Image: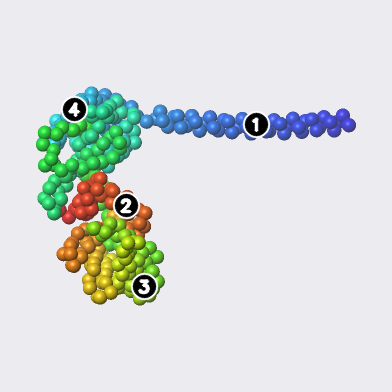
Amino acid sequence: MKFINMTLSCLLTTVFLVGCGSVDTTTSKNNSNNNSEQNTQHSLPTTQNGIYSYKNLQWQDDGKIEGNRVQYKDIKTYCQQLTLGGFDDWRLPTIKEFEELNEVKDKLNFSWSNDNYIYWTADETTISATGKDIIRMYNLSQGKSLFYYVDKLDNYGWSERCVRGGTKDSSKDNQNDTSTSSQISDIFQSYQLSGSKATSSIYFQNEGITTLNLSNQNNNFNYGGSNYEVIGSYEMPNKTTINNGDTLLVLKDTADNLVYKITYLGAYKTNNIFVRVEKPIMDQSYISIMHKYSGNHQRILQEADDNYGGIEQMYQSLFKTN
């Protein structure tokens, strides 16, 4: 009996120790993870000799930035004339590069203040329809880009922060996301050449974003809302791939009058489809966007307005049609 009691006592002690060991191991792992996270945070670089290095770029981060004001006519020469840390090959940053800097702005010696938060960028383009130049700025306090008409910037001074290294042309980043051909299935939900129904959202001027429903059984379409509905027949190419300049859709009303002709122009990030919309009855022709998911449509329209000044300007900038 003594032998059995001793054995049970040892077993219980062993179980208890194993249990404690398990708890200690978890605590050790948690401490290890916390230390790892802290080490990651501390591993971010700090400014050295007025230069902050991040993602293969070196950023100006010296006292000259605080309170500086540079006018549009001087933005290129400002960086060209800068000598810092023994380097003289400084340039204007792009929006893409500022977006990366925004990830670590709290690590900078000087990032922004109430008087110093909108920065010039190198992203500038001309709107072909109006001939007006626009330039994009970056708001480092809010982490978003803005656009301004160049002819409205006389006597305006904004902050400037120079960069060196990397690429000088961020437009290539966006161009990698563009295509001049698409699969029809990238434009319409549930689309098949022999299917029964396809839907896509489209922005019509004066009508806003609307869901366009196509029925393959009788080639009918409808769109609209509770207050109105447009119905009729449609024509669409009998193929799976469509290219720049191809007619994507022809919409006719029940009296066989042409309502809309929609021409495919290109795609941005696969599902943002640029099209030219023609409405003969109102003598209208404009560039618009289609998206197979209506929930995402408002976001791309907001991006077009905030970053480019509109849909047509966005198309011209991404596809370099100027």
Labels 2 and 1: the sequence-earlier one = 1
Where residue 124 appears, x then y in whole percent? Answer: 17, 44
The kind of residue tagged 3 is: Asn
Q: Is residue 170 above or below residue 155?
A: below
The residue that disc 1 covers is 21
Quarter holding the N terminus is top right
The residue that disc 2 covers is 298
Q: Are marks 1 and 3 in contact (CB under 8 Å)?
A: no
Q: Is residue 264 above or below residue 141?
A: below
Instruction: Quote the CA–CA distance across marks 2 and 1.
Output: 55 Å
Q: Are marks 2 and 1 in contact (CB under 8 Å)?
A: no
Q: Residue at x 34, y 68 (%)?
A: 214
The kind of residue tagged 4 is: Asn
Q: Are marks 2 and 3 in contact (CB under 8 Å)?
A: no
Where residue 145 appears, x then y in whole percent? Answer: 26, 41
Where residue 199 appears, x then y in whole percent? Answer: 36, 64
Labels 4 and 1: the sequence-earlier one = 1
Where residue 109 appears, x then y in whole percent? Answer: 29, 25
- Label 4 sits on a secondary structure element that is loop
* Circle 2 Cα neighbour tier, 10 Å, few/some/many (<14 / 14–19 / ≥20): few
Q: Nearer the viewer, mark 4 or mark 3?
A: 3
The residue that disc 4 covers is 68
Labels 2 and 3: the sequence-earlier one = 3
Determine the image quadrant of residue 117. Answer: top left
Question: Which numbered tag is attached to residue 216?
Answer: 3
Position of 198 compared to 134: left or right? right
Question: Which numbered tag is attached to residue 194?
Answer: none
Q: Nearer the viewer, mark 1 or mark 3?
A: 3
